[in-house]
Image (cartoon, rainbow, N blue to C red):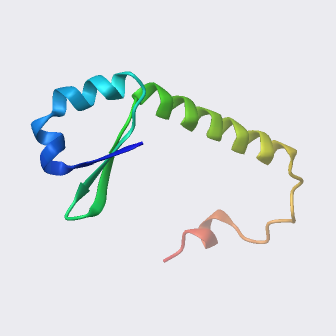
Amino acid sequence: MKTVSAAEANRRFSHVLREVKEGEIFVVVSRGKPVAIIGPAEKADAQRYAAKEALLARLRRQRATGIRTWTRDELYED
């Protein structure tokens, strides 16, 4: 993971994108504070999909914890 200032990322955006395409991840900082992350889209999509599948698998294995004593109307009343 590399760090780059916002100004440098702006000046060298094509170079940054070429490196991202090769798998590099950049943290963009402004005034010393991180403001954005630039990384490969496929990697983020794959990680998000894997996390979703893991969560759904865990939820399917869990037993119900109790009986609902509320109605839908009670849940959404003002």
> Is residue 69 rendered to the left or right of residue 48?
right
> Is residue 60 rendered to the left or right of residue 48?
right
The residue sitting at 39% across, 22% down in the picture is 22
Q: Nearer the viewer, residue 37 or 58?
A: 37
Q: Nearer the viewer, residue 64 or 44?
A: 44
> Is residue 21 rendered to the left or right of residue 75?
left
Q: Nearer the viewer, residue 42 or 72?
A: 42
Figure check: 43 above or below 9: above
Figure check: 6 above or below 43: below
Q: Quadrant of residue 47?
A: top right
The residue sitting at 18% across, 41% down in the picture is 9
Screen quadrant of the N terminus: top left
Q: How many marks?
A: 0
Residue 71 percent location from the top left of the image = 69, 67
Residue 75 percent location from the top left of the image = 61, 70
The residue sitting at 32% across, 27% down in the picture is 19
Figure check: 58 above or below 20: below
Q: Quadrant of residue 16?
A: top left
Figure check: 42 above or below 71: above
Residue 53 percent location from the top left of the image = 68, 35
Residue 58 percent location from the top left of the image = 79, 45
The residue sitting at 55% across, 37% down in the picture is 48
Tell which residue pokes out farthest to the bottom in this image: 78
